[in-house]
Image (cartoon, rainbow, N blue to C red):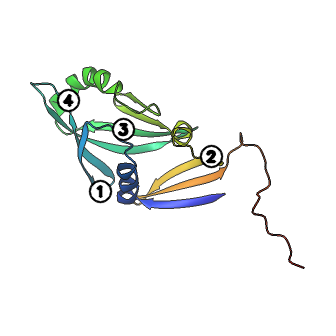
Amino acid sequence: MAKITFSLQELLDIVVSNELLPRQVVRIRVKGEKIHFVIKTNIFILPFIPASLGYVGFDGSNALFKLTNVSGPVNKVMGRLHQALKLKMPAFVTLEYPKVSVDIDKLLKERHIRGIHVRDIVFHDGRFTIVLGNDPAAPNKRSQYTHSPVH
């Protein structure tokens, strides 16, 4: 078992540098314990929607977030908007406004990362701690790099 700890900004930097966000998400920044950004809608009447994302918890293999928007009246539009954005989300992300779910197992598989399993994700004091373990589905192979005594 291993634990990796990131600040929210560090985790966001990793997500952005690996292009894990839809292209419609722009002007991303961390403020407090939330990620704030703007969603480009390509809708003439409402071209941009300011929003934020807060971590809720970890369930099974899903990291759960709550999507909120900055302006209250926009809530009526979000139901229709998420249908349009759903088509552009990565396969490992599910958006059921206001819930955003990231299937970590699918993400790892899509990125060809094998041999690890995320057991838990904890967010406390502005830091994410990701608890890793061996992938229970992976075959138990001995490493070719095992050290043997030198004679």
Residue hosting label 2: 114
For marks 1 and 2 on the same chain, the one whose residue lies earlier in the sequence: 1
> Residue 36 or 85: which is nearer the viewer?
85
What's under tag 1, amino acid-wise?
Gly
Q: Position of residue 137 (x, y in %)?
A: 71, 39
What's under tag 2, amino acid-wise?
Arg
The reply to whether callout 1 and callout 4 are in contact (CB within 8 Å) is no
For marks 1 and 3 on the same chain, the one whose residue lies earlier in the sequence: 1
From this view, report whether residue 87 is shown above or below residue 147: above
> Residue 121 or 37: which is nearer the viewer?
37
Q: For marks 1 and 3, give the CA distance.
A: 15 Å
What's under tag 4, amino acid-wise?
Thr
Q: For marks 1 and 2, give the CA distance.
A: 33 Å
Label 3 crowd (10 A; few <14 / some 14-19 / many >=20): some
Residue hosting label 3: 66
Label 1 crowd (10 A; few <14 / some 14-19 / many >=20): few
Q: For marks 1 and 4, give the CA distance.
A: 26 Å
Query: Residue at point 31% right, 21% down?
Result: 83
Q: Nearer the viewer, mark 1 or mark 4?
A: 4
Tell me how many marks there are.
4
From this view, report whether residue 151 is shown above or below residue 92: below
Q: What secondary structure is marked by label 3?
A: strand
Q: What secondary structure is marked by label 2?
A: loop
- Residue 127 is marked as none
Residue hosting label 4: 41
The reply to whether callout 3 and callout 2 are in contact (CB within 8 Å) is no
For marks 3 and 4 on the same chain, the one whose residue lies earlier in the sequence: 4
Query: Residue at point 45% right, 39% down?
Result: 64
Q: Nearer the viewer, mark 4 or mark 2?
A: 2
What's under tag 3, amino acid-wise?
Lys
* The image quarter in which residue 41 lies: top left
* The image quarter in which residue 81 lies: top left
